[in-house]
Image (tube, coloured by chain):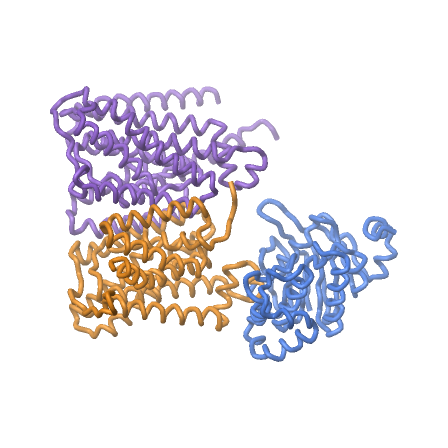
Amino acid sequence: MLNIEKLSAGYGKFSIIKDISIEVADGKTVIIIGPNGAGKSTLLKVISGLLTPASGTIYFDGQRIDEKAPHEVVNLGISVVPEGGRIFPELTAYDNLRAGAYPKRARKHFKENLQEIFHLFPILKQRKNQLAGSLSGGERQMLAIARALMSEPKLIMLDELSAGLGPIVVTHVFEHVEKIKARGYSILMVEQNVLKALRLADYAYLLESGKLQFQGTEQDFRQHPHIRLSYLGI
Amino acid sequence: MLILNGLVNGLLYGGLLALLAFAINLIFGVLNVLHLAYGQCVMIGLYIIYVLTILLHIPFIISCFVAIVALVGLNILIHVSVVQPLLKTPLLNQLIALAGLIIVLENVALGIFGGDYLGFNLIFPAFAIGEVYIRISMLIPFLCSLAALAILWLFLHKTYTGLAIKAVVQDREMASLVAMNTKQIYLITFAIGGLLAGIVAACFAPIYVVHPHFGLAFTLTAFVTVVLGGLGNLLGGFIAAFFIGIVSQIGAIIFTSEIGEILVYVIFILIILFRPQGLLGVKVRSA
Amino acid sequence: MKGTDSLRRGILFLVIAVLAVLLILSPFLLSSYLIHILILIFIWSAITTAWSYMGRFGLVSFGHGSILGIGAYTTALLFNYYGLSPWIGMFIATLMAVLFFTGLGYCCFRLGVAGHYFAITTLVEAMVINLLIINFRDFTGGSLGLTIYPLGTAPLFFQFESKTYVYFISLLFLLLTLYIWKKIDRSNAKRALIAIENDEVASSSIGIPIVKYKTVVTAISAFLTSIGGIIYAQYMMILHPDAITGLHVAAIGVPFKAILGGIFSLWGPLVGTALYTGLEEFFRVAYGTRFIGWSMAVFGVVFIILIIFLPRGLYGTLDQIFQERKAFKADKHSTIP
């Protein structure tokens, strides 16, 4: 579904990621792990169209998207939950969900999708008229995920979902991701919490210093000595 | 009850200011640009209305409609040619480019019409409620302004485009990540600004006479209103408009009209010093 | 290489010497009208340069008209009503102008009024001064203007019938403002102010006294602007609120001229003022009042195009090209691999 080949990008003279090749197959969950500053967020920015790559190609559903503007990328079916969720603080939770349903195809089924979301995340139904900025950290993350779902995406990209959240909240958040995965969405997830992320992964990539150092299934990762030492603490 | 008259007149004047403030705030909130040449746009609208109505004997309402369409076009042109290229450049460049636009528009008016005043010279009746005199020429624009504001409010809160505008104001990047075409939103915002400028011109036409320097006088009042309410804050601008309307009218009635203006400016400076972000603005940074 | 360097320096020296001779001889060779234009250019270049002390660091002021107004009017009024020589009145007036403007600036900086808010605040206070001058017309002559009581040639009272003296006074004043520009450019203040413009919070967190630097540069700018305004008023012998504190001249005109030439370079404001004043005069003479509208409109359009494509101004862009070529050549001749 998503095919990235030899992607390189950076800011001005600074190259952040080099020669990245990643694949997300239909309905699969792919995780990208790596330390801070490895370029994981930059990678998502390039895919979503916020940053133009220096070289390489990105294909989504057979279409080339590496030169497209963000709103075009989202319209094609990729949804993003950026780091911190970035809900619109001065809009109500309900309006945030409306914003998620902005693409024309999603507007048609707004009412049904909304019911689905409220079914998946009952708390949001309770808080729907509350200003999003006044929700708790975990609720905001939930809202951000729900908003991403409202656009009827084919692929959902999640950037550091667990960042800044307490451990119990993190567990809840990952449970949401499991629910989404169970519904058959393709997921591309960038995470620092390797342990929890690996459990959801169909396939994973290790990004260090802007380059892909390793890739494989959950098993491959669990058995790799460097990863066991540096990331799993085993 | 002189003061009561001042109060009522101030409210009516404030209604019009509120429309101006709304447009400037909207543009600032979405694009982070102060449309310094907004007053000049209104001036162009007035010229169009006068030329069509007085010289070509076209009915007033149709002239107003033409002016509104023309101003939408003018502002789209301004956006595409001046504002958009400068969106990522420093503050000074944007401000000065728009100041340059003031020069261009004023001098185009000067070139076409010379320095003569152009106006309707009509006298409208006033009616009294108790001791208070209300001029029809101020009441109707006031009502139009409130109607326009109400429609705009509905637009912002009930339509998807309105939602997009609100989203862009809060988080431009995230808005694009929910499939909102920010470039298009910028353009639409400027077009709305033009629309409102046209409505303001239509409201001003019966009351004022126009000349090339018409814009400067009330542009400053409009910007004072906007900054006082908090740049980008629509509700703040609304409240500030009535506040300034009332202060300036009462000041003008009690003293001279210059003192009325001075009073507004002095109060503005005092309030800004005590609340640098304006009445309802958000604190951006502290020294 | 050393040979070409000293040759270059020699040519530069020659050019400067020729220019200096021309400048000194001009008042004796040129027509009265041309000397008048030169004087205007000198005075307004100085004022514009002084404005750019603030402008180049992001402290956009639309309120320098208030400084010009307070300085010029106070000096003129002290002379008209009390016979106080402008040479002394100048300092009292400038003190008042600097205290007013810098005081307001200090309050703004201290309380966090910056960027757009600061720009509008300066615009507003200039309007206040403008309106006060107009309102107290019994005292100041209001919109009709204030004439300085003519004494003929009275050097002790800053009045000269011959333009030559004002020519040299304004030229020296211009050189002073350029000199101070250079001093600021070489000082620690410059780096501090650039840091402040980039990120105030970060700057203050590493201990840069933001308010102090902003206030000092504002005071210097106000001081020189005031004197410039006084020289202008004394030369013209007539003061008009619109010509001195008006929006077109001070709020729009001064920043315009500075940016036209380029606010980040020493000669920028001078080049911008010379060009602007020259063109304005040219259009006025060639086309009269009717067509001045169109010519100024065209000028405005050209200016906007300029800002979009040459954000560093006319001179500034040339300067940048020269600097880049110098660096490139240095690279080429570098012995370091």
Lateral position of residue B104 relative to residue C292, left or right: right
Residue C228, horizontal then vertical, whole percent: 28, 31
The structure residue drawn at horizontal position 19% and vertical position 37%, both measured from the top left corner, is: C140
Question: The N terminus of chain B appears in which quarter of the rendering?
Answer: bottom left
Q: Which chain is purple?
A: C
Q: Is residue A1 visible?
A: yes
Residue A228, horizontal then vertical, whole percent: 85, 52
The structure residue drawn at horizontal position 47% and vertical position 41%, both measured from the top left corner, is: C111
Along the viewing direction, whichever of A4 and A100 lies nearer the viewer? A100
Residue C94 figure quarter = top left
The structure residue drawn at horizontal position 47% and vertical position 32%, both measured from the top left corner, is: C213
Lateral position of residue B121 relative to residue A92, left or right: left
The colour assigned to chain A within the rendered structure: blue
Q: Is residue B202 visible?
A: no
Q: Which chain is orange?
A: B
Residue B77, horizontal then vertical, whole percent: 36, 61
Along the viewing direction, whichever of C16 and C142 lies nearer the viewer? C142
Lateral position of residue A171 relative to residue C320, left or right: right
